[in-house]
Amino acid sequence: MEVELRAKETHVLVSVRDDGIGCSAEAKSGLGTRLINLLATHMKGTVARKPLSQGCEVQVSIALDS
């Protein structure tokens, strides 16, 4: 697993990548996913999940002025 934190001018971007079985768009959201989505929305941010050739990446972007 790899975790990266980057600060941009107006946002903070947190990326989490793994080399596991991947992530499908049809995957059900568990409690953790719902909490992250609610927190990101509350902080004027977004959550994006994308499959990799091997594994999955989740990016959370949060506005610095929240």
Image: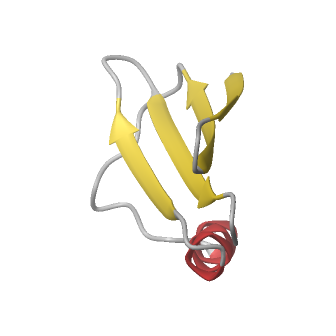
State which quarter of the image contains the C terminus: bottom right
Q: Position of residue 15 (x, y in %)?
A: 59, 35
65 left or right of 21? right
Query: Residue 59 location in percent, x, y?
Result: 52, 44
Residue depicted at 61% across the width and 80% down the height: 38
Is 23 placed above or below 17 here?
below
Asked if residue 39 lies left or right of residue 34, the reply is right
Q: Quadrant of the N terminus?
A: top right
Q: Position of residue 37 (x, y in %)?
A: 57, 72
Residue 32 is left or right of residue 25, and the answer is right
Picture quadrant where residue 13 is located:
top right
Task: Name which quarter of the figure residue 56 lies in.
Answer: top left
Which residue is nearer to you in this view: 29 or 9?
A: 9
Q: Nearer the viewer, residue 9 or 31?
A: 9
**Number of marks:** 0
Which residue is pictured at 59% across the width and 49% down the height?
11
Q: How is the image coloured?
A: secondary structure
Q: Position of residue 8 (x, y in %)?
A: 59, 36
